[in-house]
Image: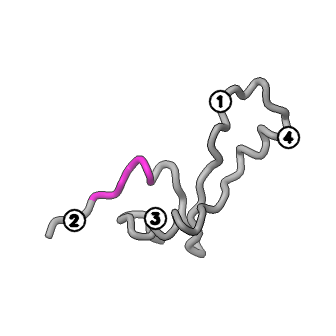
Amino acid sequence: MPKLKTRKALKRRVTVTGSGRVMHSKIGGSHLRRKKHKRTKKLYSKNIEMHPADKKRMQKVPGLRK
């Protein structure tokens, strides 16, 4: 059976921490950015943990495991 290729687009959007948590950035951070408050823009720079339902699917993707 051939090797499975890593999903490159997903690998760019998602990071896996040392403890195994799957982190991603918030959506809509660059859309209409000028109108957003400074505090709101600051919140978009942080990564957040993926929802448990999605995290379960991400663990099956080759190349994303820690």
Q: Select label 1 or label 2 by which is in front.
A: 1
Question: Which residue does the numbered mark 2 point to in the structure image?
Answer: 3
Residue behind mark 3: 58
Real-space Cα separation, disc 4 to disc 2, in angstroms: 45 Å
How crowded is the residue under tag 3: few (<14 C-alpha within 10 Å), some, or many (20+)?
some
Location of residue 30 with respect to 27 vertically, above or below:
above
Residue at image location 85% in from the left, 40% down from the top:
39
**Which image quadrant is residue 20 in?**
bottom right
- Say what amino acid the circle numbered 2 marks: Lys
Q: For numbered disc 1, what is the local secondary structure?
A: loop
- Name the image colouring: one colour
The amino acid sitting under disc 4 is Arg
Q: Are marks 3 and 1 in contact (CB under 8 Å)?
A: no
- The residue that appears at 72% across and 28% down in the rendered structure is 33
Element at badge 4? helix
Q: Amino acid at mark 3?
A: Met
Q: Please determine whether, in this image, residue 62 is positioned above or below residue 41.
A: below
Identify the amino acid type marked 1: His
Q: Which residue is mark 4?
A: 39
* Percent coordinates x, y for residue 17 in the rendering: 58, 67
- In the rendered structure, the answer to whether residue 46 lies left or right of residue 50 reads right
Q: Are marks 3 and 4 in contact (CB under 8 Å)?
A: no
- Look at the image and give the residue range highlighted in magenta: 5-10
